[in-house]
Image (cartoon, helix red, strand yellow):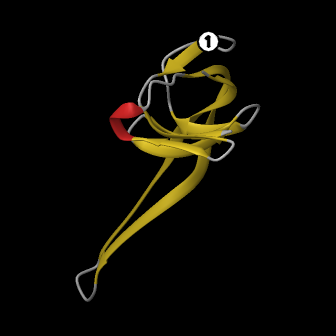
Amino acid sequence: MFAVVKIAGQQFKVQKDQEIFVQQLQGNIGDKVEFSDVLLTDNAGALTVGTDVKSVVKAEILGHVQGEKVIAFKMKRRKGFRKKIGHRTHFTKIKINEIA
């Protein structure tokens, strides 16, 4: 069984006991979260799509981490202008406990 769920503005295909990284969520390590914006479910070939989906995805927060550093370099040729900017995106690692 799998589901396509919308988490923090992004769509993820999830299964039970899967661990994924999503955009940073509010909550502490060990907190339980529920995602009710389920777009599609597949249960042994029985596909449910759209407004017929009444499922909820339950997950647990495993930790908060930062992604790899992303460098943005700006330069204007012959002007002496150079600017180097970097950032690290914040992610939350969650484990899918149940698709109900």
Residue under pointer 1: 32
Residue occupying the point 69% across, 42% down: 44
Name the element at disc 1. Answer: strand
Residue 60 vs 39, above or below: the answer is above
The x, y position of residue 53, in whole percent, is: 43, 31
The x, y position of residue 85, in whole percent, is: 41, 57
**Classed neighbour count for the residue bearing mark 1: other residues with Cα under 10 Å, few (<14), some (14–19), many (≥20):** some
Quadrant where the N terminus is found in the figure: top right
Residue 31 lies in what quarter of the image? top right
Residue occupying the point 51% across, 58% down: 70
On the rendered structure, is 85 left or right of 62? left
On the rendered structure, is 15 left or right of 51? right
Residue occupying the point 42% across, 34% down: 8
The x, y position of residue 38, in whole percent, is: 45, 33
Residue 11 vs 84, above or below: the answer is above
Residue occupying the point 69% across, 12% down: 30
On the rendered structure, is 63 left or right of 86? right
Q: Amino acid at mark 1?
A: Lys
Q: Residue furthest left?
A: 79
Quadrant where the C terminus is found in the figure: top right
The number of numbered discs placed on residues in the rendered structure image is: 1
